[in-house]
Amino acid sequence: MAYTLEYFQKSADFLKERAGFVPEIAVVLGSCLGPFAQALENPVSVDYADIPHFLLSTVESHAGKLIFGSAGGKKVVCMSGRFHSYEGYRFEQLVIPIRVLKLLGVRAAVLTNAAGAVNPAYRPGDVMVIADHIKLNGDSPLRGPNVDAFGPRFFDTSRMYTPELRRLALQCARDSALRVHEGVYMFFPGPQFETPAEIRAARLLGADAVGMSTVTEALTAAHCGLPLLALSVMTNMAAGVLDRPLSGSEVDETASRVAGDFSDYLKKVLSLI
Ligand code: HPA
């Protein structure tokens, strides 16, 4: 399938009709951060399966719905469930959601995820505003023919996590129940958690947290010039930081524990964007 502008436009045209309004901000919810979506006002929900040319969530903790509604006084479109390369999607396919949301008319994207803390000063339940990322693994989502209508073949990534939005997110932390840091996210393709040696290497390279998502969406947003904020919830200390094995249930438990406070924090951030 050739990813032309028309390819993405077909999904966007379908959604414009279903939503009935132009959303201002796109929000992508990470694993188990779904409660935010349930609290949206005047929600209009669309199953991914009904959207032409879209992808399907295969991860249990990801709902697989696009929800239009209001939060923090802003009109938002919220992806409850995202797509990862470990599900079997090719990196090129992972441009789809952000390009479709861009065509809906959003003026900013807020990406959230669950991540493992590499920085020993972080604790499970803390939030990290992503200042920058490291991706040494896997292809770029922008691989393949460039769609010039979205952005240039070669593009700058040095300010892709929009400095003004990062500042705003750190300011909002003052009134939040959460501890909020700013740091570097390192992408690993998963689905296995990293080895302790990989985490030691990540730390040497300058990473504060690791995860299996977000970077593909962030690069797609940067390519089309969409202002971007990305927030990681530390659901666990990364492999080998503590002397015990990691499990998916630890990730789910921490995410469920902080989902309420995170939802309040996110609403505050959205109200100021
Ligand atoms: N590693 C990668 N992805 C993750 C982790 C982790 O430790 N925790 C939550 N998502």
Image (cartoon, rainbow, N blue to C red):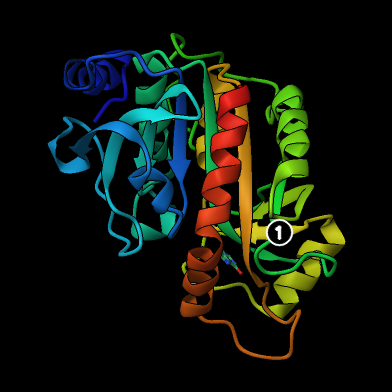
| Depth order, front residue of 35/138 | 35
| Depth order, front residue of 134/273 | 273
| Depth order, front residue of 63/88 | 63
Question: Which residue is depicted at the point 65% across and 48% down?
Answer: 135
Q: Amino acid at mark 1?
A: Ala
Q: Is residue 110 above or below residue 38?
A: above
Q: Which residue is mark 1?
A: 209
Image quarter where the C terminus lies is top right
- Find numbered disc 1 in the image and state the secondary structure of the residue it sits on: strand
| Depth order, front residue of 171/167 | 171
Total marks in image: 1
Quadrant in the picture for residue 71: top left
Q: Is residue 128 above or below residue 160?
A: below
- Ligand 1 occupies quarter: bottom right
Question: Which residue is depicted at the point 55% across and 45% down?
Answer: 264
Q: Is residue 141 above or below residue 244?
A: above
Question: Which residue is depicted at the point 37% across and 43% down?
Answer: 39
* Residue 6 on image: x %, y %: 25, 14
Given the current orientation, which residue lies at the most extreme top position? 149
Question: Which residue is depicted at the point 52% across and 47% down?
Answer: 263
* Residue 215 on image: x %, y %: 57, 43
